[in-house]
Image (cartoon, rainbow, N blue to C red):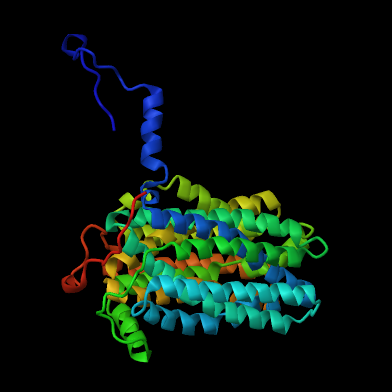
């Protein structure tokens, strides 16, 4: 904002020009992350519990592919880590979302989280026993993916019930940023652990211990019963949810651009190979790089919730993600690859906030569980398909072609797809399109205590 300085004769008594510190404070208020949702105690516990436990889960996320590569010396088999989790992710993501619309979401979150924890204990047990079986690791990953899908569907559907609608973008920014802090710390710790003797066992142990904090946060949630308007969970309710999405181009395209981004440009299956080939096995910084960028974007993302043209902004963020990933693929200095992946991570955080916000505010409460189920399938399933694509392409061609070509295809494909759907491209968050049903608008809400 600019202003004209008054002439001396017209100056108002006592008025002083804006000082540099005041201008800096104003800039900080405008851009710094909005922490207002943290005043709501259930949400605050969720963010802190989930964020802390995410550090442990990222240790497992790094340890599993590195352990598979150590046993098999194959990027293709590392890619299979993503593939084996895909089917249970799809099935239990969709069905878990339907369940979240008809049962208490707090109870569902607790039960599914307990199952996820048990699979981590299983990974620890097979490591301590020295089984050395890639097949067993893949089986545990598959079961864990199913529990993860159900837990994520419940967790995402809970946020609009405990946070006012106008604070949903800020709540999502806080959630994603806290998770990405774990994505920075976890891989760095994992990178140091997995190169040591018994390192895989240490990684799985830390994950199992830290996960108890997420369980505590779930226990302390208020009851979040269904609104009674959803049909019984089953195939019909799942199909109703998919039909709802397919008839709303705004929702459909928010999923399409994310699939394009993750399938074509997710490079993580190539990290073990590129680290071994170029940087003497230094894999930790690569796994942390995207999250570092996401954290920085989140901490300076107070402006994200004020953007109205969310369709255009989401597309621009995905294009930036693809181009940054492509550039990282030709970097032969570790610091440069990490820097470019961090830029990609910043773009990914922005796109993730817009995707989740559009979904949570566009759909009525009786559909939110199913919408979150589809969201989980796309957001978590897309990277798994990306792992398979990257690993298979690298095996058939070269690591560089797989990495760089995927990033470029992502940028071009996302832009073409988004421009083809006018309602998505022109979507205005403050003026919902005519396709939204006013009769079903308006979220239900649990009591949000503000300690």
Q: Nearer the viewer, residue 312 or 54?
A: 54
- Residue 403: give x, y in percent of width and height: 62, 67
In which image quadrant can residue 55 be found? bottom right
- Residue 85: give x, y in percent of width and height: 58, 80
- Residue 168: give x, y in percent of width and height: 34, 57
Instruction: Say if 357 sits above or below 145 in the image.
Output: above
Residue at far bottom of view: 235
Position of the N terminus by quadrant: top left
Q: Nearer the viewer, residue 400 or 89?
A: 89
Instruction: Say if 251 sits above or below 9 in the image.
Output: below
Q: Is residue 446 left or right of residue 403?
A: left
Q: Nearer the viewer, residue 185 or 56?
A: 56
Asked if residue 58 shows in the view, the reply is: no
In which image quadrant can residue 286 be found? bottom right
Total of numbered circles in the picture? 0
Q: Is residue 182 left or right of residue 173?
A: right
Asked if residue 131 shows in the view, the reply is: yes
Q: Nearer the viewer, residue 411 or 109?
A: 109
In which image quadrant can residue 31 be found? top left
Residue at x-position 31% and y-position 85%: 240
Residue at x-position 44% and y-position 75%: 108
- Residue 207: give x, y in percent of width and height: 64, 64
Residue at far top of view: 9
């Amino acid at each position: 904002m600019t202003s004209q300085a008054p002439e001396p004769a017209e100056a108002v008594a006592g008025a002083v020009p804006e000082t540099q510190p005041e201008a800096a404070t104003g800039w900080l208020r405008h851009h710094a992350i909005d922490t207002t949702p943290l005043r709501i105690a259930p949400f605050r516990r969720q963010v802190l519990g989930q964020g802390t436990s995410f550090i442990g889960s990222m240790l497992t996320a790094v340890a599993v592919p590195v352990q598979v590569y150590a046993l098999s010396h194959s990027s293709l088999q590392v890619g299979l880590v993503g593939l084996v989790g895909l089917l249970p992710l799809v099935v239990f993501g969709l069905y878990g979302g339907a369940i979240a619309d008809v049962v208490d979401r707090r109870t569902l979150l607790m039960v599914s989280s307990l199952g996820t924890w048990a699979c981590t204990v299983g990974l620890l047990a097979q490591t301590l026993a020295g089984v050395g079986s890639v097949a067993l690791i893949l089986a545990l990953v598959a079961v864990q993916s199913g529990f993860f899908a159900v837990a994520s569907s419940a967790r995402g559907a809970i946020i609009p019930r405990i946070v006012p609608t106008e604070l949903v973008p800020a709540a999502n920014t806080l959630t994603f940023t806290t998770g990405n802090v774990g994505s920075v710390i976890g891989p760095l710790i994992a990178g140091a652990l997995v190169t040591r003797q018994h390192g895989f066992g240490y990684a799985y142990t830390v994950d199992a211990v830290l996960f108890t904090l997420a369980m505590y946060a779930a226990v302390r949630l208020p009851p979040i019963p269904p609104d009674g308007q959803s049909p019984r969970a089953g195939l019909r309710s799942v199909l109703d949810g998919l039909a709802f999405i397919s008839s709303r181009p705004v929702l459909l395209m928010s999923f399409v651009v994310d699939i394009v981004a993750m399938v074509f440009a997710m490079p993580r299956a190539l990290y073990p190979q590129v680290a071994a080939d170029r940087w003497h096995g230094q894999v930790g910084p690569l796994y942390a790089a995207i999250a570092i960028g996401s954290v920085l974007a989140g901490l300076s993302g107070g402006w994200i919730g004020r953007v109205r043209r969310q369709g255009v902004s989401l597309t621009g963020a995905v294009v930036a993600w693809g181009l940054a990933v492509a550039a990282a693929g030709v970097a032969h200095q570790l610091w440069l690859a990490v820097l470019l992946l961090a830029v990609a991570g910043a773009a990914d955080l922005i796109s993730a906030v817009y995707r989740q916000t559009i979904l949570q505010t566009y759909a009525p409460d009786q559909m939110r569980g199913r919408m979150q189920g589809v969201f989980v399938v796309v957001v978590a399933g897309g990277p798994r398909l990306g792992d398979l694509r990257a690993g298979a392409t690298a095996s058939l061609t070269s690591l560089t072609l797989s990495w760089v070509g995927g990033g470029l295809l992502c940028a071009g494909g996302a832009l073409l797809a988004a421009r083809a759907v006018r309602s998505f491209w022109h979507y205005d968050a403050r003026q919902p399109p005519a396709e939204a049903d006013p009769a079903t608008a308006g979220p239900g809400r649990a009591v949000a205590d503000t300690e």
